[in-house]
Image (tube, grey):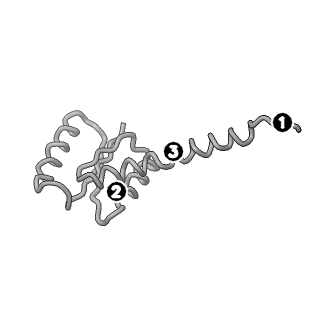
């Protein structure tokens, strides 16, 4: 298991440093593989999450506001959702019974 922590330093309360320290200590104590990345602009969390998936991260933790979490979830689910929708549409088109008049 690999954890990617995506932190937005501009969101939420000003206690981010303390939270990051607690999370880091907890992960280190359990020898959990993890990496921390900070967002730098709007939409950056989505990009970080997509990169994390390609790099083999199995879990993602959002440390920010609603926007950070939303971007991460969208980035993770959108490709799968598109794939499922496309597959479903293809099955409907190619398996449609053909009736002759």
Viewer-proximal residue, 16 or 30? 16
Q: Residue 43: image x %, image y %?
A: 36, 61
Q: Residues within 10 Å of mark 2 (few under 14, many from 20)?
A: many
* Relative height, residue 29 to residue 6 (above, below): above
Residue 4 on image: x %, y %: 32, 47
The x, y position of residue 16, in whole percent, is 15, 53
Which residue does the numbered mark 2 point to in the structure image? Answer: 45
- Residue picked out by circle 1: 99
Q: Earlier in the sequence, mark 1 or mark 3?
A: 3
**Residue drawn at (17%, 49%), measured in percent from left and top?**
20
Quick one: SS at disc 2? helix
Q: Earlier in the sequence, mark 2 or mark 1?
A: 2
Q: Is residue 12 left or right of residue 37?
A: left
If the image is split into quadrants, where does the N terminus sit? top left
The alpha-carbon separation of the residues under discs 2 and 1 comes to 49 Å
Looking at the image, which residue sits at the far front?
A: 101
Viewer-proximal residue, 58 or 79?
A: 79
Marks 1, 3: nearer the viewer? 1
Binning the other alpha carbons within 10 Å of mark 1 as few (below 14), some (14 to 19) or many (20 upward) gives few
Rounded to the nearest angstrom, the CA distance separating label 2 from label 3 is 19 Å
Q: Secondary structure at mark 3?
A: helix
Q: Is residue 47 left or right of residue 38?
A: right
Q: Which residue is mark 3?
A: 81
Q: Looking at the image, is mark 2 or mark 3 earlier in the sequence?
A: 2
Considering the numbered disc 1 on the image, is that residue within a helix, a strand or a loop? loop
| Quadrant of residue 2 within the rendered picture | top left
Q: CA distance from mark 1 to mark 3?
A: 31 Å
């Amino acid at each position: 298991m690999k954890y990617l922590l995506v932190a937005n330093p501009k969101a939420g309360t000003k206690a981010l440093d303390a939270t990051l320290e607690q999370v880091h200590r907890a992960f280190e104590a359990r020898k959990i593989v993890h990496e921390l990345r900070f967002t730098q602009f709007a939409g950056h969390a989505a990009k970080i999450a997509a990169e994390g998936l390609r790099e083999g991260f199995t879990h993602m933790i959002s440390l920010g506001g609603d926007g950070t979490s939303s971007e991460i979830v969208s980035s993770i689910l959108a490709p799968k959702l598109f794939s499922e929708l496309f597959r479903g549409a293809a099955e409907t088109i190619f398996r449609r019974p053909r009736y002759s008049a």
